[in-house]
Amino acid sequence: MPEESEVRGLLASLRVYLEELQESGVDGLPLAGAGTASAKPIPDSAQPNPLVGAENRESLEEIRAELGDCRRCQLGKTRTSLVFGVGNPQARLVFVGEAPGRDEDLQGEPFVGEAGQLLNRIITRMGLKREDVYICNVLKCRPPGNRNPELPEIERCGPFMLRQVKSIAPEVIVALGTFAAQTLLGTKAPISKLRGHFHDYHGIPLMPTFHPSFLLHNKKDTSKFWDVWDDMVKVLKKLDMSVPDVKRKE
Ligand code: URA
């Protein structure tokens, strides 16, 4: 049996860890075995191997056609629309979010709700247009009640997102929020630790940043907005694009 002092020490460390998770936008943890955010990278082998040369790459239309009226997981039964992705098929920059929400499920387009409006503002601030970039999610269908994605859903849907990324072959990817960042990078590290640095995703530099919904839930904490802006400045520099002058109010 552990000593009482040991147990207290463990509980104190656990509390610090949970507070850190909460601060980074995690609002729930999976039950053992239930599996939400995957710590396993999305397998590359699941589907045809899109060859790297542009002439051999599969098109987004081909990937969409293969998804069809997808029923590969239980979300096929509850969704209104399958939300594939939107934007420039030759985008230099791809944004990847978690999964469609209510507005996206109804309209069939990613990031069209409140979080999407904020993402649009971020894109505009970067000197870009929504049509210049490509936007998609790890999951193509809305989890009922916006619950966390489950492992079988990620395993069935994730490979299609990877194929979209390979088809577009962007120069930079931005992973929006804890779930997308952890799933793409196959890690459980908190977003507060992942953001601000480029990581490698199948040879493409990937910048994790806070999810627009997290910013909306923490409107008073303007430092998080500036963290996202700092991340986007790094993305623009990586793309050799000019960085708009944005004044910070202290
Ligand atoms: N949040 C996401 O992660 N994706 C969307 O498309 C909308 C909200």
Image: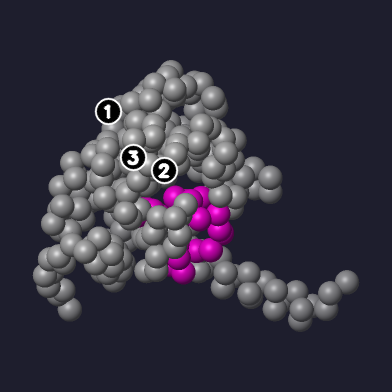
Q: Which residue is mark 1?
A: 107
Which numbered disc flags the more N-terminal residue, 1 or 3? Answer: 3
Q: Which residue is mark 2?
A: 52
Which disc number belongs to residue 54?
A: 3
> Residue 156 appears in which quarter of the rendering?
top right
Residue 148 in percent (x, y) is at: 50, 43
From the viewer's perspective, is the residue at label 1 or at label 3 nearer? 3
Q: Nearer the viewer, residue 4 or 174?
A: 174
The residue most toward the bottom is 5
Say if 159 sits above or below 117 in the image: above
The residue most toward the right is 1
Within-10-Å neighbours for mark 3: few <14, some 14–19, many 20+: few
- The residues colored magenta run 174-195
Q: Nearer the viewer, residue 10 or 244?
A: 244
Question: What kind of element bears circle 1?
Answer: helix
Amino acid beneath label 3: Ala
Is residue 226 found left or right of 139 in the rendered image? left
